Image (tube, rainbow, N blue to C red):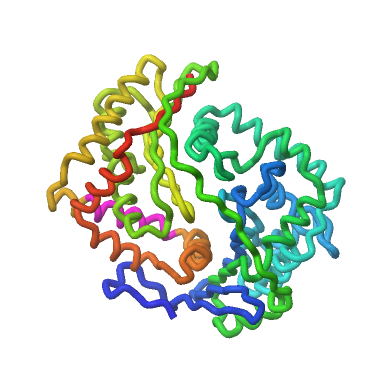
Amino acid sequence: MAKKSSKNILSDHFHPEIFVLPNGLRVVCRQREGMVSYIGVVVDAGSRDENPEHEGLAHFVEHTIFKGTDKRRSWQISSRMETVGGELNAYTSKEETMIYTNAPKGNEERALELLADLVTNSRFPIEEIDKEREVIIEEIYSYLDTPSDRIFDEYEELAYKGSGLAHNILGSPESVREIKSADCRAFLDRFYRPENMVMYCVTPLSMREMIRKVEKFFGLIPSMDVEHHRITPPPMEKFDERRDNGTHQANTIMGVRTFGRNDELRFSLFLLNNYLGGPCLNSRLSREIRDKRGYAYTVESNVALLSDTGLMSIYFGCDPSNVDKCRKIVEREVEALCDTTLSAKSFERIKRQYCGQLISSSDQIENRAMSLGKSVMYYGKVHDINTTIDRIMSVSAQEMREVAELIFADGLSTLTLL
């Protein structure tokens, strides 16, 4: 059973527990008072796990898994939860796919039976996937028409060059047109296996009752060893590129590669990122670029950590005449992080601000439920918010400076779409 933080910053009535079914499926379950159950399956497979000739396949499967099973047609799947007021959805990332639902209390078996049907019996009927193929291609074009989105994909192509992380999650129109029904089924058979999945349940039902229901629908799925062939991308070659995109606004990303999500330095990195360009208006870059000078409407920094690597990126959109000015400010602020140790008082304020943001964001129950599944997938245990806050509050100003020195040692790589 997961332990509670001694500070009990954010308390739940019941602790989450992890169960492992005989077939290897890990189930993390938490009972909570309420009238809704949140249930989902996290699959340890994403765009990184595709073969080069099938770029976009993981996302394609996520879309078309709803298009028909042995006993249901597309419209029956889409309406199964909606007819009782619930929802069914999914998403794909570089390293994971999640299929999830929420269900009014009393409909847990309906949700579990549907999820089990999808991950085991999806048939990817040709007439349905041909229609969905066009939907996905339109989704790709919508991103290509949005430079502020497109630049992140193009930046990752450069940052992760030479690996399966380089291509974007959606694939290209050309690669999507080549995906066949058999490719989808093969991907499902390979990765949607009990040992390669985690189920999360946040429910008003007792844990014993919920686990009994999970076993009823997921316990008979046959187990099979799943081998991942993930290759860590080679070291990032520094770059500085400007590409003509034919738009009024220039979009720029400046960034560096980092360590992966299991590194203990990640807590210092999260603080550094939030202080430099987090979502609050008092971040360093927001003050210097937006408030003081009015150079940009949007300026932010982000950290995306994967199993064996990661990326910190600083984005701003501005008039082309201000690109170099903004770049200089970013470089100056990064140098200051490497050269200066913040005072104890200032750093304490930074930590408390970040912890407050974590608490505010965790108020969304569905997000917290998803986090349970991902935590067990990534770390084999539940990292609840209290544990994370305790770890954040233990970081020192010197540790944050050392992380800055580590990741910014070779300078920033830059891409601008003009």
Q: Quadrant of residue 411?
A: top left
Number of marks in picture:
0
Residue 360 is one of the magenta-drawn residues:
yes
> Which residue is farthest front?
234
| Residue 287: x %, y % from top left | 26, 33
> Which residue is farthest bottom?
208
Name the residue nearer the viewer: 4 or 57. Answer: 57
Q: On the rendered structure, is 58 left or right of 369? A: right
Q: Is the N terminus in the top left, top right, bottom left or bottom right quadrant? A: bottom left
Q: On the rendered structure, is 40 left or right of 72? A: left
Name the residue nearer the viewer: 192 or 408. Answer: 408
Prevailing SS of the magenta stretch: helix
Residue 319 is one of the magenta-drawn residues:
no
Q: Which residues are magenta?
A: 350-363
Residue occupying image coordinates x 28% and y 75%? 6
Q: Specify whether residue 300 is in view.
A: yes
Q: Is residue 279 above or below residue 387?
A: above
Q: On the rendered structure, is 381 left or right of 60? A: left
Q: Is residue 110 above or below residue 397?
A: below
Residue occupying image coordinates x 77% and y 43%? 179
| Residue 256: x %, y % from top left | 39, 39
Q: Is residue 72 above or below residue 56?
A: below
| Residue 325: x %, y % from top left | 30, 20
Q: Specify whether residue 365 is in view.
A: no
Q: On the rendered structure, is 290 left or right of 65? A: left
Residue occupying image coordinates x 58% and y 55%? 96
Q: Is residue 323 above or below residue 31?
A: above
| Residue 260: x %, y % from top left | 43, 53
